Amino acid sequence: MKRLISTFALAAGLAVWAAAATAGPVSSDDILKDATSTGDVLSYGLGPQGQRFSPLAKLTPETVAKLVPVWSFSFGGEKQRGQEAQPLVHDGVMYVTGSYSRLFAVDARTGHKKWQYDHRLPEGIMPCCDVVNRGAAIHGNKVYFTTLDARLVALDKDTGKVVWNKKMADYQAGYSNTAAPLIVEGKVITGNSGGEFGIVGMVEARDAETGELVWQRPMVEGHMGTLNGKESTRTGTLNASWPGDLWKTGGGATWLGGTYDPETRTLFFGTGNPAPWNSHLRPGDNLYTSSTVALDPDTGEIKWHYQTTPHDGWDFDGVNEFVSFDLKKDGKVVKAGAKADRNGFFYVIDRTSGKLLNASPFVSKITWAKEIDLKTGRPVYIDDNRPADPSGAEKGKPVFAAPAFLGAKNWMPMAYSPQSELFYVPANEWGMDIWNEPITYKKGAAYLGAGFTIKPLYNDYIGALRAMDPKTGKIVWEYKNPAPLWGGVLTTGGNLVFTGTPEGFLKAFDAKTGKEVWKFQTGSGVVGCPITWEMDGEQYVAVVSGWGGAVPLWGGDVAKLVKDINQGGSLWVFKLPKA
Ligand SMILES: [Ca+2]
Ligand SMILES: [Ca+2]
């Protein structure tokens, strides 16, 4: 990029040419280096490993008091709802997605809109859990995002014109898309949504230039994969962990997308609940649902898997991000990865083999399992806490289970600081009454076979931002929040942790102590992912604001507690001005 600028500047001898030349293409190598390049944010997760750590250190617990808003940009429109996106920044332009499958390009210095793309959504889309989108990807001269009608769209990054628009799946069968795509070596890699409708979870890779399918890997045992337009291999062994034909509508949606580790050249995708929720209909482990699955980026072949909730009966989707990191323990460095699962356990896994290294609770109450057996890697179930078989009755005997199905942690990504060597996990403390019901599959209809009501566990808080030490599995500090936390986390080389709250604040904490050191009221609930970057020698922070997501729709008694929070839709940008 720098070389391009100087070539143009020399050739033209004009400053304006240098400015124009800065709108250059993004290479796969630029994306691999995203975690350390502080002048841009080129990937969801601030680097493909998804650590959400920036080395920027101008903002510290001491200087953060001077962090001030620079501009705010409204997503407009009558339709608002949840704004869960993480913005990207490239060459002074921000790319941010909004609810209802919208994508905006905005001048990062002024907040001036460059272009806007409103995807035309058909009637009858079936997003289970709000009309959210989690962000775009950038590569070459294109930006990419997925849509609620299960498509993947590539746009010219400078004009917003559609370059290609590919159907991933049939939205009328309950498929949709909300995840930010991942770019690896010229391929756009995405997951799919729809686990509540009996769809089949899938990871697919497309050529970033043409949008042509390279490979697909179904996540339910029994289905065939594809590679270069031909059938490749079967996922697992037919009927090994699923009875009869149930695998054909087995769920396992990969709705949060994935991460990539360049050191081991491995993709990590989490998979959602098996369908239907009523576990008595599908005896067996129901592979590869509620798991972390490691994939070869060239072929989509499965390298290893680790199932967090075998034979799930509580909607404990295993989709949460698997974050690669170096575990320094007993004088050794282990290539590890960590995941804070919906089911309440924080897992540390050897990312070269899938071997479980440690699993410890990150919430106060877990009713479904006593512990995770570190020898076998399997949960020690508490059988009485599995919702009972309705056996012909309209409704099986209910149980009170914790965590609630919305999870000890849901989609909102945690952050890892290689400096403090801590993970910062946005957790929630809640439980649920849950019972099973009879159900049969019908295309495009909810496929649960269960009923539920979510309830808070404590009077004074539901959300808890927790610093977890992956070496010990212990909680080092916590911040308690009255409403459930639903936004992502960012940590920085300046010893800070940022996250948002449904009450409308973007907050900063001391990364070592958890002391709250800064907050700003954005006007609506913050359920997006904060970012930071450097521009013109100053450190910037940005976050989207706009309350929504799954809690108001599925939250039961908790939804009632937060019903007065107003919706919104805006992008806020802050900076630490030069002294
Ligand atoms: Ca970067
Ligand atoms: Ca689910």
Image (cartoon, rainbow, N blue to C red):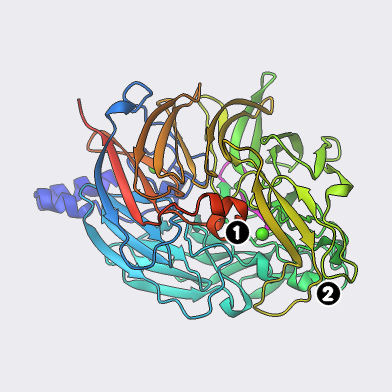
Give the vertical position of 561 relative to 329 (above or below).
below
**Local secondary structure at mark 1:** helix
Left/right of residue 125 with respect to residue 394 in the rendered view: left
Task: Classify the position of the C terminus by image quarter.
Answer: top left
Q: Quadrant of ligand 2?
A: bottom right
Which numbered disc flags the more N-terminal residue, 1 or 2?
2
Q: Position of residue 314 (x, y in %)?
A: 75, 54
Q: Locate residue 550: give its quadrant.
A: bottom right
Q: Amino acid at mark 1?
A: Trp
**Local secondary structure at mark 2:** loop
- Please give the range of residues in magenta: 261-272
Give the vertical position of 18 relative to 457 (above or below).
below
Q: Nearer the viewer, residue 485 or 10?
A: 485
Q: Amino acid at mark 2?
A: Asp
Q: Nearer the viewer, residue 401 or 137?
A: 401
Residue 426 shows up from this direction: no
Q: Locate residue 363: give its quadrant.
A: top right
Determine which residue is flagged by label 1: 554
| Residue 245 marker | 2
Magenta span includes 264: yes
User: What residue is at 78 percent from the left and 76 percent from the top?
Assistant: 440
User: What residue is at 38 percent from the left and 66 percent from the top?
Assistant: 102
User: What residue is at 65 percent from the left and 34 percent from the top?
Assistant: 335
Crowd class of label 2 (few under 14; some 14 to 19; many from 20; radius 10 Å)? few
Q: Locate residue 468: give its quadrant.
A: top right
| Residue 85 marker | none
Q: Position of residue 169 (x, y in %)?
A: 58, 75
